[in-house]
Every structure is written in C-alpha cells, then in structure tokens.
C-alpha cells in the first residue's frame, strides 16, 4: 500500500493545500517538528514556483524508505508541462532572479532544507523537482555503493491509497527492487502490495525467482498482485529479473532499451509452475525502469542524457509525467520505479 497525496496547483489557494499535504505526510512518517517545518517550507516554495513559472502543475507526496534503510522519509515531487528551466545551475544559485521573481532564492531554500533536492528542466517540456525530507538530517546521501533506486506512486482519482507500491532493499552485495501492483485499486489492492513490501524486507537475500515464490505464499490471504523483482549483484555486475503478472520492465544497456518480459499469473492467486529468471550484465550506464499497467503502454523511454544523469526519483517522475497529459489522466493506480548505477558517466 502506498499513501499518496496529490495536489493540483493552479491558483494561489492551492499553495496552502500543498503545505497541508506535506505536513500530514510528515506526521504519518513520524517526523519531528523541525523536519516537518522544513518539509512545509519546501512544499511552499515548490508550489509557488509551479504557479509563477509553469502556469501550474501537480504536487505529489509519497512516503519512502530513506537511504539509511530505517524509518520513513517524505518525498515531494512537482511535475509540470511549463516552459522548463533552461539553466538549472543558475536557478539553484541563491539570489539568482529571473525577470518575474525570485526563482533562485526559493530553490536555494529547497536545497538547504531538504535532505536531497533535484531539479530537471527541459525547455518546452516542463520541469520535475523532487525533494526528500528525512527523519534526521542526512549525513551523505548514499547508504552504500552500487545502484540507487527511486520511484513515484500515484492513485486513481487522487485517492489517498494506491494499490501500487515499490521498495528497494540492500543486503550485503545485493540491491533488490520490487514493484507490486495489487489487483484492482484502492485499499484492498494496497493490502496486497503492502504485504509484498513487508515480505521483500525479509526475503531480500534470496534470488529473484525465490523472492517471487515467497511473495506468492505471503500474498495468499490478499487478493493478489502483479509483481516484478529485479536484483543487482554488485559483486558479479549482474542483473537478475523475475516477474509474474503485468509489470512493465525496460532495461537500458549500451545497445539501447530492451523489454524484460514477465510471466502471466497473479502472485498470491494463480502462480505459474515455473518462473523464468532473466539475467543481464549490469554496467555503469545500466538503467532499469519498472512500471505498473497504469502507465500507458506506449510510453517512450527517456533519451535526454541530462535526464538520464539525474537521480532515479527524477527519472521515474519524468517518465510518469511524459506518459500522460492533463487531457488523459491515468485510469488506474500508477507507479514507476527506477534503478540506476551511480555515479553514472
Ligand atoms: Mn493496475
């Protein structure tokens, strides 16, 4: 289950709604007053920027596991289809002001108050901003070497609960990414994907096809889910992938993008006799995108090298934004999770 806050920001009254959403999220994450105040400040700046520079957009708030692996962090995203920021470095420098207002000062404040903050703007395509507020001030962003994961979850009709969930678990040299799409949508679907996340935390030392099998047992009391598990062995430099049900998976290698195919079935209900394991080499420039079927199937994988160099959370949010449009809202709970080697070339 994923708790989702999604606030459309199209006039100034919505800036307060954005702040309220982040305060609620910080409360659910158990953050203290200082981190909550930081989160509210970042929400205010990002929502204000949507109005001033993009003609409006959307704030999405998710609860995520921090790089330390313990506790809960709050992840904010703003997505827009505005003109995009041409010079992000200049925009992030404090005191840099545009003709209209103080874009730079606001973003500098985000940079200082968030534990991680990234901005990606492409002229004509809009901007993605993301900030993470951790329970404690981060001391370095990375838990360890190897690939980093990030994702975004939204829900059908902006419901509080999404039936989709993702999680990444590190266990010694293994980095395991799960994406789960509970059957249908809403709280019961969320119960299934939540059970998958809980079991992954216990099973992350197992190979992917074994994890999927364990998830099948764990999900029997639920209505079931589509599941994909991707695991990078950082010692061998190898990716293992196993999926059951309709989860999209695309892997970027030096030759371009390839699809990793899941096996038909429903984890927790109808389990295939044999779950194939797909192996692929994992390089410095490897990148994996997992997504639920809420994402239109004809989405195009990102090619902009500037985008590919960003944090996986930015990539996931950009994929989600670019697959849809205000005229075509998602018809299901939707999630995108990205695993990327860091640092990338
Ligand atoms: Mn679905």
Image: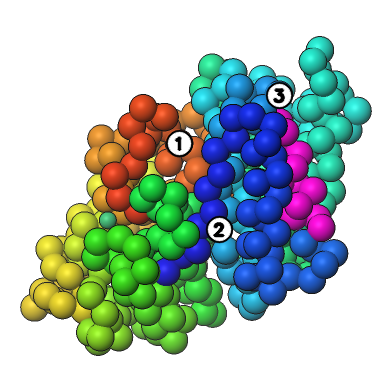
Separation of residues labelled 2 and 3 (CA atoms): 24 Å
The stretch drawn in magenta includes residue 45? yes
In the displayed structure, 263 sits above or below 58; it is below
**Colour convention of the picture:** rainbow
Query: In screen coordinates, is 136 left or right of 345?
Result: right
Q: Give residue 95's position: percent from left, percent from top.
A: 91, 28
Q: Which residues are magenta?
A: 37-49
Q: Earlier in the sequence, mark 2 or mark 3?
A: 3
Which label lies toward us, 1 or 3?
A: 3
Query: Quadrant of the image for the N terminus?
Result: bottom left
Task: For label 2, count other residues whose C-alpha is less than 10 Å away and answer few (under 14), some (14-19) or many (20+).
Answer: many
Tell me, yes or no, if residue 45 can be seen here: yes
Disc 2: which residue: 62
Disc nearer the start of the sequence (1/3)? 3
Ligand 1 within 8 Å of the CB at mark 2: no
Residue lying at 78% horizontally and 44% vertically, measured from the top left: 110
SS at mark 3 in the image: helix
At horizontal 28% and vertical 39% (from top left) the residue drawn is: 296
Q: Which residue is located at x 59 percent, y 18 percent?
A: 83
The residue pinned by badge 1 equals 321
Q: Which residue is mark 3?
A: 52
Label 2 with label 1: CB-CB less than 8 Å = no
């Amino acid at each position: 289950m994923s708790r989702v806050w999604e606030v459309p920001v199209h006039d100034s009254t919505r800036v307060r709604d954005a702040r309220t959403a982040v305060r609620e999220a910080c409360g659910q994450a158990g953050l203290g007053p200082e981190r909550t105040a930081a989160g509210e400040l970042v929400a205010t700046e990002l929502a204000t920027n949507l109005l001033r520079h993009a003609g409006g957009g959307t704030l999405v708030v998710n609860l995520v596991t921090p790089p330390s692996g313990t506790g809960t962090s709050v992840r904010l995203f703003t997505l827009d289809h505005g003109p995009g920021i041409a010079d992000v470095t200049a925009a992030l420098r404090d005191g840099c002001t545009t003709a209209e207002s103080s874009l730079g000062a606001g973003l500098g404040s985000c940079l200082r108050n968030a534990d991680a903050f990234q901005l990606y703007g492409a002229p004509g395509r809009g901007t993605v901003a993301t900030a993470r507020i951790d329970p404690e001030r981060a001391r370095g962003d990375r838990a360890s070497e190897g690939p980093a994961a990030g994702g975004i979850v939204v829900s059908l009709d902006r419901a509080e609960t999404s039936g989709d969930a993702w999680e990444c678990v590190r266990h010694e040299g293994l980095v395991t990414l799960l994406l789960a799409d509970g059957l249908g949508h809403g709280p019961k679907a969320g119960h299934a994907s939540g059970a998958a996340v809980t079991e992954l935390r216990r099973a992350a030392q197992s190979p992917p096809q074994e994890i999927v099998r364990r998830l099948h047992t764990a999900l029997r009391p639920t209505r079931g889910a589509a599941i994909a598990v991707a695991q990078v062995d950082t010692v061998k430099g190898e990716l293992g992938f196993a999926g059951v049900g309709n989860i999209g998976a695309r892997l970027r290698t030096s030759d371009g993008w390839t699809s990793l195919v899941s096996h038909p079935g429903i984890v927790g209900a109808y389990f295939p006799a044999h779950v194939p394991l797909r192996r692929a080499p994992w390089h410095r420039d490897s990148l994996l995108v997992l997504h639920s079927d809420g994402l239109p199937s004809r989405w195009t994988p990102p090619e902009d090298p500037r985008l590919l160099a960003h944090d996986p959370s930015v990539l996931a949010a950009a994929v989600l934004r670019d697959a849809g449009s205000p005229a075509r809202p998602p018809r299901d709970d939707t999630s995108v999770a990205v695993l990327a080697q860091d640092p990338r070339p």
